[in-house]
Amino acid sequence: KGITLGPMTTKGMARDVVDAIESVVPLRRCTVRMGRNYVAPADAPVCSAARLGLAECPCSGSADASSYGAIVDTVVRTLKGDAQDVLALLTDRMTSHSQNQRFEEAAFVRDRIDALARALHRQAQADTLRDGGLQDIRHEGITYRINQGVLVETVSSEEVCNPETLNLPKTLE
C-alpha cells in the first residue's frame, strides 16, 4: 500500500517529477530505512543534502518530527493530486529567476512544473478509468470494453475478442 503517480512513459519524466518536488520541498534524500519508531543513533551523521540546506535530515535526529511531518504531508497531498502548494512554490521560483534575468533556470523550472502537471493529469485520467467501472469506448468501428481501467474485451464486426475466445494460456511459460 503506497501512493502511486503515473503512468509515466519514461524514466526521465519520473526523474523530472521527483526533481520538481525535491527542488521546493525539503524532503530527506538519504536512504536510511526508518520505521515509525525510528530513533536516530547518537553518532548519526547529517546527510549532505541537509548540510547544504536542501533537505531535512530526520535520520540523524536533527529534524523536528512535527515540522518534518508537515513536509511529508505536503508531498502526500501533491502525489494525491492536490499540488497547489508545490506548484505555487515552483511558480514563485520560476518568476524569481525570470525577474533576475536567469532565463535558462526559469525555463528549467517551467519544464519541471510541466512534468509534474502532466504526471498529475495522467494520474487523474487513470483514476477515472479505474473508478469508472465497466465502460465501452468506440473508435473507428471497434468497441473496447474496459473494466476498472483494464481492457477486458474488444468487439470488431460483431466478433468478440477476449482471453476466452482467443484461447490464451492462463499463464505464460
Image: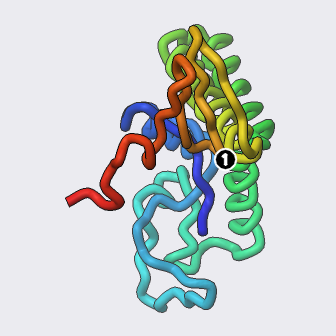
Question: x and y percent of residue 59 in the render?
Answer: 51, 76
Rendering colour mode? rainbow
Q: Which quadrant, please, contains the N terminus?
A: bottom right
Q: Is residue 85 left or right of residue 167?
A: right
Task: Give the labeled residue for mark 1.
Answer: 148
Residue pictured at 73% horizontal, 26% vertical: 92
SS under mark 1: loop
Q: Amino acid at mark 1?
A: Gln
Q: Is residue 25 left or right of residue 9?
A: right
Whether 167 is drawn above or below 151: the answer is below
Q: Could you say where residue 14 lies in the image, as x and y percent from the top left?
A: 46, 39
- Residue 109 visible? The answer is no
Using the image, determine if residue 121 lies above or below residue 166.
above
Q: Work out which quarter of the rendered image holds the C terminus and state it.
A: bottom left
Give x and y (percent) for residue 66. Answer: 77, 73
- Give the camera-side residue of 46 and 4: 4
Residue 17 in the image: above or below residue 77: above
- Out of 47 and 168, give the one closest to the viewer: 168
Q: In this rendering, would 4 be left or right of 173?
A: right
Whether residue 107 is visible here, answered yes or no, is yes
Which residue does the image show at 60% across and 14% down from the upper left? 139
Residue 33, quarter of the rendered image: bottom left
